Image (tube, grey):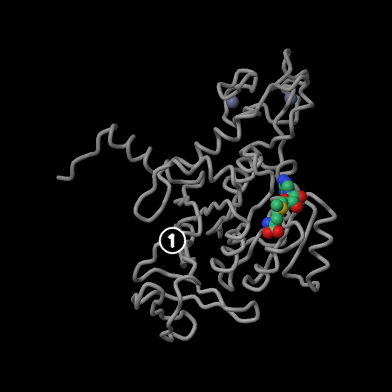
Amino acid sequence: MPSESSPQDDRNTERKRRKFSSPDGRNVKWRLYTGATTFRKQDRVYVRPKSAREKGVAGRLIERLNDRKWKLRSDDHNEVLIVYENRMIPILSFPKTENHEKDPLSIIITAATKHYRQLAASQLCPQDAVLEIGCSTGETSEIIWNRASSWIGWDTSAEMTERTMSKHSSSCHRVCQKMNALSEPALAYQTVHQHQPATTAVWMDIGGNRDMNGVARMLHWILTSPFPALRLIVVKSEELVRELSSVPVNSEGILQMDGMEFLNQKRLEFCRLPRHPQQAPKVYSPTDPSLPICRYHNYHKKGCGKGSDCPFDHVHCHMCLEAGHVAMNCTKLTFD
Ligand SMILES: C[S@@+](CC[C@H](N)C(=O)[O-])C[C@H]1O[C@@H](n2cnc3c(N)ncnc32)[C@H](O)[C@@H]1O
Ligand SMILES: [Zn+2]
Ligand SMILES: [Zn+2]
């Protein structure tokens, strides 16, 4: 007779499942990329070309020949090639499968722009549809354009989006916009949904290396927005790398932590009570991305004057998004 699991076992399994999952239950693998890698037989790698005019080669390592060279089988033509280790970049993400709701989602975090761009050159495949947040003048965008089937680029600065747009010939598969998903999460989501519903990868570099809060909020927005085809997120943030460098990793280099818990903590670290409800940012209901959470209900001493006639969300906390309390009573709130 099969033994039934105890409530204690259930709780442990539940905790373990949550620890490495996104809110929609996907298996999320967080790792840091520093450029220093030990390669092993069977690893998938991308080999950088000698000049920008040539194409790189992706494939699987067959065997080490000496301390500088490896034998590799290329993906494209199944050829056996001899490649130099100093040109190799590990392929760290997982390809899409038929049943893609079950595919793991990789989050790769790097501190250096050089590595952020190397990842753009090495981790994408021609089927990828990329959202680039913080495209600036389009240096990384150009690398992505050569490797993915479609692209949306955002920047909060119109000057930047104009400069990036001037670089590419107009194409319906490339859209560059002035957009800030932190201040207009619902509009931002609608835009991606309209232009590129099957977004598979996000590249994100919103600058401000000391501003962990913005980076954490943006990552939180990505992970809580429904992007069913998403397989990879690449983040450039020195501060995030510093924060995570003491987290233990397993033998595959995956960080052993509860990623959502970490993001929630960081997202809330700088939250303060606003002096007036309208000074609080617009935040949307976790159950309806077009419905703002009522700021009077959350922050006014007397609550919301409209009571049950108020069209906004009175259910969820404006601070932590959980149901059942208002931000003024939120345990996640920090005071000066
Ligand atoms: C360091 S630059 C990005 C450089 C780019 N990755 C490259 O390889 O050249 C950061 C950019 O993020 C933009 N930015 C800052 N906050 C943003 C936000 N919330 N949404 C979109 N872009 C943002 C800035 O305007 C700036 O152009
Ligand atoms: Zn209200
Ligand atoms: Zn709360």
Residue 223 coordinates in the image, percent (x, y): 57, 47
- Asked whether mark 1 lies closer than 8 Å to ligand 1, one says no
Instruction: Note whether 82 is above or below 268 in the view shown.
Output: below
Instruction: Note whether 307 is above or below 19 in the view shown.
Output: above
Please tell me which residue is depicted at 49% across the width and 51% down the height of the picture.
Answer: 32
Please tell me which residue is depicted at 74% across the width and 17% down the height of the picture.
Answer: 300
Please tell me which residue is depicted at 35% across the width and 67% down the height of the picture.
Answer: 40
Residue 307 coordinates in the image, percent (x, y): 73, 20
Which residue corresponds to mark 1? 37
Q: Residues within 10 Å of mark 1 (few under 14, many from 20)?
A: few
Front one among 294 and 219:
219
Residue 170, picture quadrant: bottom right
- Image quarter in which the N terminus is found: top left
Front one among 45 and 102:
45
- Image quarter in which the C terminus is found: top right
Front one among 225 and 255:
255
Residue 17, picture quadrant: top left
